[in-house]
Amino acid sequence: MILQQDLLSLQFYKKEKFTGSCRGMRYLIRKSTENDSDIFEVFTWPGPYNFASTDEGKKARKTFPFQQESLADIAGYLNEIYESGKDAWPTGIF
């Protein structure tokens, strides 16, 4: 299970992206801009490969407002995605 505290603070995302994994599901969270507004861009994809090495067709994308409160929503979203597709995530050592 991914917790909000696992996703660090809003300040971190102002300068860096964050990648993680949960039992075969990989994810990337980064700050981006859309329609002149700052947003969180969240990608999920099946492991074992990194973001750059994974086919675009295997990645899912969702956006959230760039604010501290969104980190709880992102944690919830990542857990939902994991649960809804857990049979599809690769097994092994991750």
Image (tube, rainbow, N blue to C red):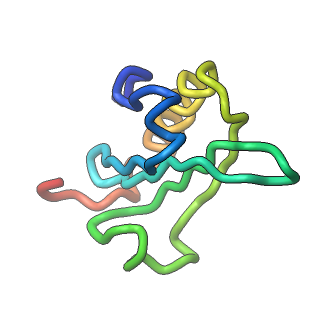
Identified at 41% across, 31% down, the residue is: 7
Question: Where residue 4 sits: x, y (%)?
Answer: 44, 22
Question: What quarter of the picture does the N terminus occupy?
Answer: top left
**Residue 53 vertical placement versus 81 (above, below):** below
Quarter of the rendering containing residue 56: bottom right
**Residue 93 vertical placement versus 29 (above, below):** below
**Residue 3 vertical placement versus 35 (above, below):** above
Q: How many marks overall?
A: 0
Identified at 45% across, 61% down, the residue is: 45
- Please give left or right for residue 14 compared with residue 63 in the image: left
Question: Where residue 92 sits: x, y (%)?
Answer: 15, 58
Q: Nearer the viewer, residue 1 or 50?
A: 50
Give the residue furthest to the left: 93
Question: Where residue 43 sits: x, y (%)?
Answer: 54, 55
Identified at 79% across, 53% down, the residue is: 34
Q: Nearer the viewer, residue 7 or 25?
A: 7
Question: What quarter of the picture does the C terminus occupy?
Answer: bottom left
- Please give left or right for residue 17 compared with residue 90 in the image: right
Question: Where residue 93 sits: x, y (%)?
Answer: 12, 56
Identified at 45% across, 26% down, the residue is: 9
